[in-house]
């Protein structure tokens, strides 16, 4: 195996980051980050659910190595995995949106304005929504909000999944 001597938690964090980067590039190639951005919330949710699969596989691999499974230990392991993953993926997202897909936010704003043109009930409504969109769709703000959402999923996974792990 590629990472045979590496800490299991760090190894799985790397797996998740690589999977997430492949997912981002796949979304871009398919068009979910520009032409068919309407589907982006659904693909992002699917991605977060698939991250949960990595957490389950991680728990299973640690269960094979441990003599006794303890809920608190598994929670700590998953929280550590979450910290590694969130920090590394935050850097990957920053580099991705800065260098690989720098037009991402402009594409979302253009698509959002098109949608608002069709649905806004008044000119004031349109202007307020456009201002909010312009404020949100900037790299630092976007990274902060998406990382917070990912953290929420990480906490749910970290506290929920160990409850279903049983001793050998």
Image (tube, helix red, strand yellow):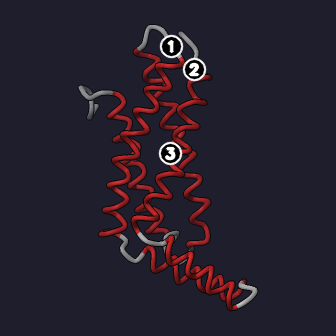
Q: Is residue 65 above or below residue 131?
A: above
Residue 54 pos. (x, y %): 48, 37
Of marks 2 and 3, the one in the foreground: 3
Answer few, some or many: residues within 10 Å of disc 3's Cα (few below 14, many 20 plus, some between 14 and 19). some
Element type where label 3 sits in the image? helix
Q: Give the labeled residue for mark 2.
A: 165
State how far apart marks 3 and 1 are (Cα).
24 Å
The residue furthest right is: 121
State how far apart marks 2 and 1 are (Cα).
7 Å
Q: Are dots 3 and 1 in contact, CB under 8 Å?
A: no
Q: Give the labeled residue for mark 1.
A: 69
Q: Is residue 16 above or below residue 107?
A: above
Q: Are dots 2 and 1 in contact, CB under 8 Å?
A: yes
Q: Which sits earlier in the primary sequence, circle 2 or circle 1?
A: 1
Residue 164 pos. (x, y %): 62, 22
Residue drawn 48% across the image and 22% down it: 74
**Along the line of sight, the residue nearer the viewer: 33 or 73:** 73
**Along the line of sight, the residue nearer the viewer: 77 or 167:** 77
Q: Is residue 28 above or below residue 110?
A: above
Q: Give the labeled residue for mark 3.
A: 151
Of marks 3 and 1, the one in the foreground: 3
Residue 70 pos. (x, y %): 51, 14
Element type where label 2 sits in the image? loop
Residue drawn 37% across the image and 59% down it: 93
Q: Which sits earlier in the primary sequence, circle 2 or circle 3?
A: 3
């Amino acid at each position: 195996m590629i990472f045979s001597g590496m800490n299991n938690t760090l190894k799985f964090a790397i797996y998740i980051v690589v999977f997430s980067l492949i997912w981002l590039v796949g979304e871009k190639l398919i068009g979910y980050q520009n032409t068919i951005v309407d589907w982006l919330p659904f693909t992002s949710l699917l991605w977060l659910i698939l991250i949960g699969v990595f957490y389950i596989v991680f728990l299973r691999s640690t269960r094979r190595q441990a003599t006794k499974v303890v809920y608190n230990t598994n929670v700590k392991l998953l929280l550590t995995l979450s910290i590694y993953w969130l920090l590394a993926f935050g850097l990957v997202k920053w580099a991705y949106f800065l260098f690989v897909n720098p037009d991402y936010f402009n594409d979302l704003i253009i698509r959002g304005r098109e949608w608002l043109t069709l649905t806004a009930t008044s000119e004031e409504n349109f202007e307020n929504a456009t201002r909010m969109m312009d404020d949100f769709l900037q790299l630092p703000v976007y990274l902060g909000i998406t990382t917070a959402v990912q953290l929420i999923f990480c906490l749910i996974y970290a506290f929920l999944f160990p409850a279903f792990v049983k001793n050998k």
